[in-house]
Image (tube, rainbow, N blue to C red):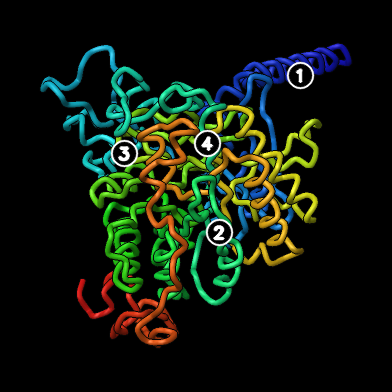
Amino acid sequence: MRAAAFILVLLACAAAQAERVKRQAEQPSEEETLKKLCAGKGPGEWFRLNAGQEHCKRVVQCTSAGLQQIKCPQGLVFDVENQSCDWKDNVFNCDQTAREVKAKPLLNTDEPICTVAGELACADASCIKKELFCDGIEQCSDGSDENACDNGNDPNRAPPCDSEKCKLPSCFCSEDGTTVPGNLDPRDIPQMVVLTFNGAINNNNIDLFDEIFQSGRTNPNGCPIKGTFFVSHRYTNYTAVQDLHARGHEVAVFSISQNDTRNYWKNASRADWAKEMGGQRFIIEKFAGINDNSVVGMRTPFLRIGGNNQFFMMDKQKFLYDSTITAPLSDIPIWPYTLLNQMPHACHGDAQKCPTRAFPVWEMVMNELDRRDDPSVDDNLPGCIMVDSCSNIRTTEQFYNFLNHNFDRHYLTNRAPISLNFQQSAWLKQNEFLDTLMYWIDEIRQTFPETYFVTMTQVIEWMQNPRTLAETQAFDSWQIKCEEPLPFVCSKPGGNNCALHVDEVPGTFNMQTCQRCPTNLPWLSDPTGEGFL
């Protein structure tokens, strides 16, 4: 009896062992699990292992060494669609483990799917004309024609730079973006500095601009130094804009609404872009009395690039240049270029949507500024675009050193134009930064007589017709409004102070203009302010 029981125990143990071995054999290996997790994920794509609010901070990424994990800082969660940490209130996909998988067109197949010449296949194998891909308008029933539109996939992408075909004055490119126009010696060309200011122009900053561009502050050709103002609509005093234009400064467009809805600018249609930018140009020209067709540039709010739709609009509306795209910090800065060829640098920034097609538009590229206190020490600090966003600048000494170091980075290499961009001009009123900037401008003018403080359009004019230092002294395009301008006088002292309302925006707004007051606040659907679309 005991022997039989013992045998039964042995049999049970053997069966249990066999069951364990079977289960282990059925369980996938770590390598198989990783392969399954990473299937369908794009290079560098972050995703969640588990969905839900409690897991929204943590994401992982597939690498050659396995899964890499990050956790968003306190108060932030991860947006899997935009692939970045953001405030909780801005993220609505914590219930997703990964970004939505979009249908992709069948562009590269072993056998051709479409039999008609000039057609390509959607994800569902239906065929449409090649030129309809990546035009900002969904033509495939599954929308796949707009889902593979980066520089590596867009079938209508701009060609690489070919300096034999791309010739000034209408086209300029170089392989890495650092070549001097006309192949001139950098030591024999002017160092151009562009001061740009974003936003509304009003009583909060008019005095500041008067100080920076005060009488007597001139370039080596005897003309006053000039700046470029990207003007938004709300709170702008158009009488002051008219004054700046009369004094020779450049007025450009910064949109009507300044819409801060996430992805609004990235996903805006051509019609949206036309209302925002074409509408703001109309408002500027009408209410600042600018009738010389000089409003030809634009910059997008929050520096959010609108992809091909933005530049389709620019081409149709005859804008000359955009100044939104940024180039990453590098040893040698990049010159502005036309978008008739592929950009000479990567599409830089968080989830940006750069153009891929060819457009007859100049890109006044924004080179990142080096904000390290000691450039000889590698602090691995990323660059910054807007001067007032360089958060480590806290003292006038730091600001002064920052200006000198970045000037040297341009002046001592290829003398690409240096753009000092200010999002909030009021930043200059802190900590005597304004005095520091004016001291630096005067010092540069005295120490480096090759330096010109010019507008964006003046940079393009020089690039279209490159000149040596000696020739630049008498460069006709830079002689316009060269005399010290007389003070601008409005026909009505102080102009008209118009109290206006529009249904789309709550509240009443005061708009100053030397022109007749409109009936309503000019806005997207009615830039005239008179009820006319």
- Mark 4 vs mark 3: give the one in front: 4
**Disc 4, disc 1: CB below 8 Å?**
no
Q: Is residue 409 left or right of residue 280?
A: right
- What amino acid is labelled 3 in the image? Glu
- Above or below, 497 relative to 111: below
**Disc 1, disc 2: CB below 8 Å?**
no
Spatial distance from mark 4 to mark 2, Cα to Cα?
Answer: 46 Å
- Give me the residue at 40% from left, 78% from top: 489
- Give me the residue at 21% from left, 41% from top: 139
Image quadrant for the C terminus?
bottom left
- What amino acid is labelled 2 in the image? Asn
**Residue 12 image label:** 1
**Residue wearing tag 3:** 146
* Quarter of the figure with residue 273: bottom left
**Residue wearing tag 2:** 90
Q: Residues within 10 Å of mark 3 (few under 14, many from 20)?
A: many
Spatial distance from mark 3 to mark 1, Cα to Cα?
Answer: 62 Å
Spatial distance from mark 2 to mark 3, Cα to Cα?
Answer: 25 Å
- Above or below, 302 relative to 244: above
- Above or below, 513 relative to 120: below
